[in-house]
Image (cartoon, rainbow, N blue to C red):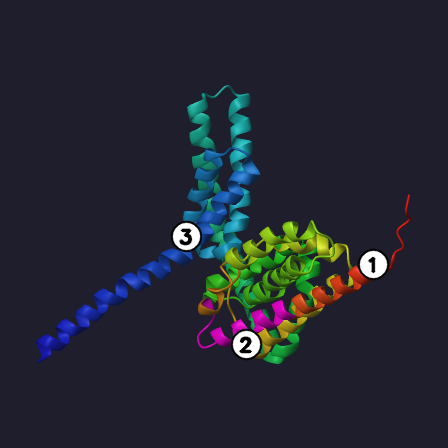
Amino acid sequence: MMFYQHLEQQEQRIVQEPLHLRQHLQKNSIPIVICAIAAKQVSGLDEVGVVAGIVAGILAVDGGILGGLIIGILAGVLAYYISVFCFCHNVPDTTVNIASGGLGGLAAGLVGKFLIAPVALWIGNGICSLINMCIDYNALLAGAVAGLLIWPAIIGGVYHAAILPIVLLEMEEMGFSFLGAIDMTGLVMVSAGITLANIILPKQKGEAAVALPGCIINICFGTFVEASYPFMFSNKIVFAGALASATVGGAIVGLFNVKGTAYVPAVLAPFMANEGKGPAFAVAMIAAMGCAFAITMAANVLERKKSGKIPVKKV
């Protein structure tokens, strides 16, 4: 009997170990990738910058996503200046590449491991804790405010600099993201609603052809919210409707404590939400899209009526 119990325990361990290994690799690989991309962009050295970023990222992987970004920037700067120094002293090209990628990455990685990573991890955890604190204080209000502000954030250029890294931080810690759910409902689904309305009832004939690709990409890929910009910026009612619809979607996300992600097909997003919150996520998405669709339709009807009242002079 004891032999069979031991055998069952071994089988369970064999099944569970690959799962833990995959989760561990997934969590640790994202900071390394971010570090490599940051080093390449900052250094401008292409493959050498990538090598420097990977070396630095492996050494300082404990810093998480925020640490990977900071350390990658440092690795890129060091790789660039090492290469400049080597070229000024007529060092052979192969040696320049080894010194830039290897030494630059090693120096940045060691600095990151002992100085930057602990601070970056603390800041990242603090940001996630602050978000959770706001949700615990008043989830409905937190969701509504986040939904209201997400459009001004992306239009003003703040989204990719501030919100997207926070989404990644949340995903790293929990596998889900509150702001990711706000992104899907407040941006993607609202944009889909606006473009769908302009396909069905456009103000002018050519606008349907402009709106169609944006609507398809938003629904099928969970991105390309910029497709609704021409319609938002040309009509104040549509713009206000986008803000209102995002607020409604965000409020539902907050009310039901939904956490999910964006950049996935709309039909899959509810299945990728936190446990038991898929239906609530679907409701929030449909509500945001429905509000944006209805308001845009109404705005287009008003515009078409105004256009019909303008007298046309016969030549």
Q: Position of residue 175 (x, y in %)?
A: 45, 65
Magenta part of the protein: which range?
272-290
Is 288 contained in the magenta span? yes
Pointer 2 local density, CA inside 10 Å: few below 14, some 14–19, many at least 20: many
Return the mark for residue 257: 2
Residue at 51% over, 25% down: 86
Distance of label 3 from label 1 (alpha carbons): 58 Å
Residue at 53% over, 55% down: 66
Pointer 3 local density, CA inside 10 Å: few below 14, some 14–19, many at least 20: some
Residue at 44% over, 56% down: 62
Circles 3 and 2, Cβ within 8 Å, touching? The answer is no
> Mark 3 or mark 2, which is nearer to you?
2
Using residue 223 as the reference point, say whether residue 175 is left or right of it: left
Q: Quadrant of the N terminus?
A: bottom left
Q: Position of residue 192 (x, y in %)?
A: 61, 60
SS category of the residue bearing label 2: loop
Q: Amino acid at mark 2?
A: Asn
Name the residue carrying label 3. 29
Mark 3 or mark 1: name the one nearer the start of the chain. Answer: 3
Q: Quadrant of the C terminus?
A: top right
Name the residue carrying label 1. 308
Mark 3 or mark 2: name the one nearer the start of the chain. Answer: 3
Q: Amino acid at mark 3?
A: Ser
SS category of the residue bearing label 1: helix
Return the mark for residue 193: none
